[in-house]
Amino acid sequence: MSNDKQFDFWYAVNNTELITTPTGQLETFGDTVVNYYLVCQHMDSLDKVVVREGHLKALKPAIITPQSLGQVDVGDLGAEAQEYADWLREHANELRIIQYGFSLEKQELKEYVVSDHINNVLDRVKQEVAEKDDPLSSILVGVDDPWEVCLMKLMVDLVQHSAQGNMQDFQQQSVDMKKRLTDNIDQAFLEASRDPSKINGLAKMLKLNNLWEKYEDRFFALVKASGQ
């Protein structure tokens, strides 16, 4: 990575201010669409402000695996956002967020230039967003170039905010799945004790779920009791 490229994305990251963010966390088991309003001082004119409005789609998070550790897909956010993602990947040991993993898709809606002071424009955007009462909206003040990195910074902050809740959801899902599996196996043992023809199906269930060793003694006790 060149020093110029590194400067570009760090300049954008360090000059991005999140004015408002979505009130809830990113969805654990589905996609989340965030409606962004990015206000930037025009890079070529001090008396002009650029406002960009659009959607960011954060795809549902995945369970962390050694293979997925550090994977970040920035979609069409641009080269500077990819440089930032590369930096995150290289520093995975230092950033808990990168261990989370996420993907982004950008759908740009509109962009317009206003001749006014940036604070006045920001006040109007705040009022507009407040009137919409959108819990998935976010207002940012950032840089005009590379402005895509400002959106990347938004999503990193959102994932940091959501990671603990998402992990709790995953853990609860895992507990629920294990309980359902245990209940299903107990039911299968009961049915096999009443109908020996179902013993082979029980064995397949245990092996399919990598639980043969855990239930091996119980299984052979059942076989012995059934006279097989």
Image: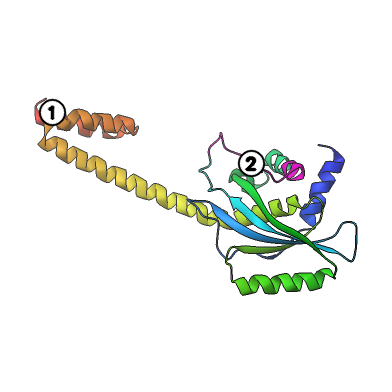
Left or right: 2 with respect to 98?
Answer: right
Residue 66 within the magenta-colored segment of the rendering: yes
Q: Quadrant of the C terminus?
A: top left
Q: Which residue is mark 2?
A: 73
Nearer the camera: disc 2 or disc 1: 2
User: Which residue is pictured at 65% across the width and 70% down the height?
Assistant: 129
> Which residue extends farthest top?
228
Judge whether 209 appears above or below 34 on screen. above
- Counting from the top left corner in percent of width and height, residue 206 is at 28, 33
- Regarding mark 1 in the picture, which secondary structure is present there? helix
Left or right: 171 with respect to 23?
Answer: left
Question: Who is closer to the viewer here, 186 or 35?
Answer: 35
Residue 128 found in image quarter: bottom right
Residue 97 within the magenta-colored segment of the rendering: no
**Which three-letter amino acid code belongs to the residue tagged 1?**
Lys
Mark 2 and mark 1 lie on one chain; the one further toward the N terminus is: 2
Q: Quadrant of the N terminus?
A: top right
Classed neighbour count for the residue bearing mark 1: other residues with Cα under 10 Å, few (<14), some (14–19), many (≥20): few
Left or right: 111 with respect to 170?
Answer: right
Please state the extent of the stretch shown in magenta in the rendering. Answer: 65-84
Question: Who is closer to the viewer here, 137 or 176?
Answer: 137
Q: Which residue is mark 1?
A: 224
User: Which residue is pictured at 82% across the width and 64% down the height?
Assistant: 49
Judge whether 159 appears above or below 207 on screen. below
Left or right: 213 with respect to 12?
Answer: left
Judge whether 212 appears above or below 47 on screen. above
**Which three-letter amino acid code belongs to the residue tagged 2?**
Asp
Label the magenta part by its dominant secondary structure: loop
User: Which residue is pictured at 54% across the width and 55% down the height?
Assistant: 164
Judge whether 82 appears above or below 145 on screen. above
